[in-house]
Image (cartoon, rainbow, N blue to C red):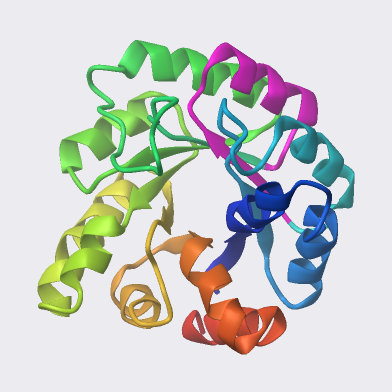
């Protein structure tokens, strides 16, 4: 069964808007696990506008499922991940000013850099995933970096889904097959939702994990966090 990792960045955004510790990030993470999440994802950015570096340290001893830290591999990010030692690190090509992740890596142009970073994390026993688009050459070159997994950037799928869902999912299915052929496991994330997740899951093979934050936290405003996680898990059966 494909695992559901809940990205709790948006919870931190709400907390930071008022200061203090409401909502409590640590409690939310534990509740997500208790309600059935298979993992917790955080994406600390240099300006700490949502998840803060301190949060990452505080969360690590509490996570009993899988802890996934994603972000751009600056030296400060690398040092954070090596100190915390999560189960997985997801490398995202975000510049510091990016509002949200909006592209995958060019694994050809950044091959040497990615190879070095991947090796550094793997030496510490941390599984590595590289955020990529559906370009087959990018995926084949991702394998050459030594990464364990790729994460498919799914915003194009979410955008095109209402127009033609079969056409929208086709490149992702092809990308997943190509990744499997070169020995990579497959994650996916960005704008997956209750509207489009089931169809994606049914049509993209070899899917190990999805990471979902914005849509899931938004749905929780209506359904409550526990029911929302159950709803997302149902889509992955």
Q: Is residue 84 magenta?
A: yes
Q: Where's the N terminus, which quadrant?
A: bottom right
Image location of residue 191, percent across then percent down: 37, 63
Q: Residue at x 41, y 57 (%)?
A: 188
Residue 145 or residue 92, whichever sits in front: 92
Residue 24 placement: quadrant:
bottom right
On the rendered structure, is 72 left or right of 61? left
In the drawing, does residue 236 fall left or right of residue 158? right
- Judge by depth and name the residue closer to the eye, 100 or 80: 100
Q: Answer whether residue 233 is visible to the viewer in this image.
A: no
Q: Which residues are magenta?
A: 66-87
Image coords of residue 186 (percent x, y): 42, 53
| Residue furthest right as drawn | 61
Residue drawn at (43%, 81%) of the image: 194
Answer yes or no: is residue 137 visible.
yes
Q: Quadrant of residue 127?
A: top right
């Amino acid at each position: 069964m494909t695992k559901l990792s809940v990205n709790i960045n948006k919870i931190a955004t709400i907390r930071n808007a008022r200061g203090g510790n409401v909502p409590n990030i640590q409690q939310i993470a534990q509740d997500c696990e208790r309600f059935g999440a298979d993992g917790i994802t955080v994406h600390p950015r240099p300006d700490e506008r949502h998840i803060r570096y301190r949060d990452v340290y505080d969360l690590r001893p509490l996570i009993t499922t899988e802890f996934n830290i994603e972000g751009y591999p600056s030296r400060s990010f690398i040092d954070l991940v090596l100190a915390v030692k999560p189960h997985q690190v997801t490398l995202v090509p975000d510049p510091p000013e990016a509002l949200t992740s909006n592209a995958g890596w060019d694994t050809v142009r950044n091959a040497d850099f990615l190879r070095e970073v991947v090796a550094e994390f793997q030496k510490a026993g941390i599984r590595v995933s590289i955020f990529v688009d559906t370009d087959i050459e990018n995926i084949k070159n991702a394998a050459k970096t030594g990464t364990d997994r790729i994460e498919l950037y799914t915003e194009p799928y979410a955008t095109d889904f209402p127009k033609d869902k079969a056409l929208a999912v086709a490149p992702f299915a092809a990308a997943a097959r190509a990744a499997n052929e070169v020995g990579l496991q497959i994650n996916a994330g960005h704008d997956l939702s209750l509207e489009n997740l089931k169809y994606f899951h049914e049509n993209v093979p070899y899917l190990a994990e999805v990471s979902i934050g914005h849509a899931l936290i938004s749905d929780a405003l209506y359904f409550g966090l526990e029911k929302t996680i159950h709803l997302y898990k149902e889509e992955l059966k």
